[in-house]
Amino acid sequence: MERLFRWTFRVVAGVLLLLGIALATVLWLASRSLPEYDATETVAGLDAPVEIVRNTHNVPHIFGESDADVFFGLGYAHAQDRLWQMTLLRRTAQGRLSELFGRRTLRTDELMRRLRIYRNATASLDAQDAATMEMLRAYSAGVNARIEVINREASGRGAPEFFLFSREIAPWQPADSLALMKLIALQFSGHLREEVRRARAALVLEPERLRDLHPDMPGDGTVILSKLLGDAPSLRHARAEDTFLWPSAPSGLSGASNAFAVAPDRAAAGGALLANDPHVELSAPALWYLARLELETGGVIGATIPGVPVIVVGRSARLGWGLTSSYLDDMDIMIEELNPDDPTKYRTPDGWAEFENERSIIRIKDEAPVTLTLRRTGNGPVLTGGQFNLGQVTPRGHVAALAWTGSSPEDTSMRTGMELMRAQTLDEGLAAAEHFIAPSQNLTLTDGEEIAMQLMGRQPDRDPMHQSEGRIPAPGWIAENRWKGLKPFADNPLWRAPDSGLLGNTNNKITDAPFPDHITHYWGDSQRVQRMERLMNERKVHTRASLIEAQLDTVSNTARTLLPLVGRDLWFTGESASPGTAERRRQDALELLAAWNGEMSEHLPEPLIYAAWMRALNQRLIQDDLGPLAEEEYPRMEPLFIERVYRNIDGAGAWCDIIHSSAVESCSDIARLALDDALQYLEDTFGAGVTTWRWGDAHEAMQDHSVLGNQPGLSFLVNIRQSTSGGDHTLNRGRTDGLGPNPFANLHAASYRGVYDFSDPESSVFIISTGQSGHPLSRHYDDLGELWRRGEYIPMTLDPALARAGAVGVTVLLPED
């Protein structure tokens, strides 16, 4: 027995020792890729020395003798901290993910190849002006210099992920940065999905009920899919797809943002104010990377995107700029009719035409390569029926092609970013917007004395007789449905020096113009704008603090509107029920909600009860009408739909009656049943006791590593989870998807916030949602995340002396002799 014990002890100790050695080896190898910020390196491609001065938050301040050298330094800094993120984005744009991840990413690669993302980026090189090309080349040289240093000094392959996947890193090219811009344009546009969603609903709903689910804007017309396309397929349950590294956001989770601008006469200190918080999908690391560049025209500081050599949002000494998604309708799905006698041809207004065909080979890890035939029509690339559920709305004998401004092979959007950084006046900043193609954005500007907002991005030139007005897929062989080109930039709306002294945008409707000058039928917000108007107009003057307060505001006007409407027959009715009963639980919940002010605070139970009630109510209302489509395409509550139903606008109260029951249910019946559903769900999930529930327990910010985030043993190291306030319809937005085991998780939020005060520019502040580093072992991987969660900021300075005085590391890059 003693002998057995002794050998068992030795075996266990040996195994533990080997595991310890293995873990230590892994950590040592991973730590090798942590960059040394206090270093001097001799690199190729520089004309003169460059300094990368990092402050305590790891924000690089880059100094050089020329703009080209500064952009070289930015490329080097990006590659120091985010090399894996950059190469993963590049592989996504190139359609080469399957070389690393196998068949799981074949759908993504196929989509990128069909959209010609990288090919069009390469073609766009010829459209760049000399200054932009110089910037792109210098930036690429900086990235490649860092890769060379990694290889020369055996610096852990540059990032720990390269130990798990291919170590090969191709040199960075100018086309790579342009391709990333196109990839972001795809991620920020939700119109393709919206067209499919509306078309699928049109197959099963009468026109008046479709208007409830997709409320019309003034001047809109409703066109039913079946009248346009004839033999449409029957609605059926779509096959669930793996969303791993899928580049297009689900419906409702594409780009969003807030921007507030205050003219000097409405600012307490007499200088213009600008606040901006772009909303994107949360991830670890964040999309954004903070940087400061000292250009020949002066310093500029703000948020960059690794792989892209511009300050996307930020300020210089003379100009501040912010971006919000405009929701301009830059996509149309065109249904192309195949020639029944020769499917290699499709119908056009002038007869049958040949598809433009191209072969493309996708290499797949550990498998034989797949060869695709990529087809293109005069309207755009042909997509497959399995992408975006297009097969559900494409009639037999037809295929779907995508017209999209982002497909342009003459995309000059990068030039806009370069010229904004160099702009010295408001006029120069506005002029820079003319070069922007996609994704369309509202550009908010101030030069400290004046404020302006300019829609930028090219608008499709649609015929006034377009059959669907871009709402749902339309026949591509009808001339009136085809784009006539792109509208001139002069047609884009501009607001400058408003009499009120205030400008703002929450992705809300910005024009009442009728089709085809409408911008879009699908606006990104109808709710946050109400809160913005109240906060901005209730003060005679504003300060930096008041704009920060607006960015962090978590009051839901939607909850304040819907709760009295939905629960009007439930409040304080009946006798007090016995403790422990479902009736008492409902009464307790209603009592809490009756006293609630709509604050979506992470510490309160009321936001969770409200969110669960509205989610259950939405499903109760639409499930019997839409079937599987209800959860697939409408998992979240749409406030305008609920309001139409409970105000019975145009007979919308009909949604409350359950089709398959003999009784006639009232909207109060459905509200009560939905509340019981919600409370039972919350009790099953969070335990008994209404007052013990907390919104933050359900509304965690899910900042996950895109590749390693779901790997056992690694997720705890690479994922960043934080309890957060806010919700779908608050200015401090925390968008949910309504799906899966965590339907209220915060997936899409303001991962960058900046507030610029031109009365005292050095008091301007900014923050991102994670940290500067993409390395999980770095202290800068998540050091800004807790500040972001608490609504705190860090200062942003353009004073070189201050940057150097607070430096915690200086990288000096020297040119080769």
Image: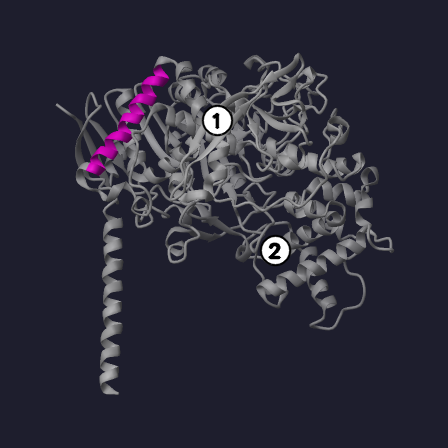
Quarter-of-image position of residue 377: top right
Q: Earlier in the sequence, mark 2 or mark 1?
A: 1
* Residue found at the very far front of the displayed protein: 341
Name the image quarter holding residue 10. bottom left
In the rendered image, the vertical position of residue 178 relative to residue 586, given as above or below: above
Image point (82%, 42%), residue name: 648
Crowd around label 1: few <14 · some 14–19 · many ≥20 (10 Å): many
Q: Which residue is mark 1?
A: 272
Decide: is 382 above or below 297: below
**Relative to 732, is 235 on the left or the right?**
right
Give the image location of residue 666, x and y in percent: 83, 52
Numbered disc 1: secondary structure: loop
- Asked if the residues shown at circle 2 and circle 1 are in contact, with their CB atoms under 8 angstroms apart, the answer is no
Q: Secondary structure at mark 2?
A: helix
Depth check, mark 2 against mark 1: the one in front is 2
Q: Amino acid at mark 1?
A: Ala
Q: Residue at x 27, y 28 (%)?
A: 142
To which residue does mark 2 refer? 608
Distance between the alpha carbons at the discs numbered 2 and 1: 38 Å
On the rendered structure, is 470 left or right of 658?
left
Q: Which mark is residue 16?
A: none
Q: Split into 4 quadrants, where in the image is the C terminus?
A: top left
Name the foreground residue: 737 vs 476.
476
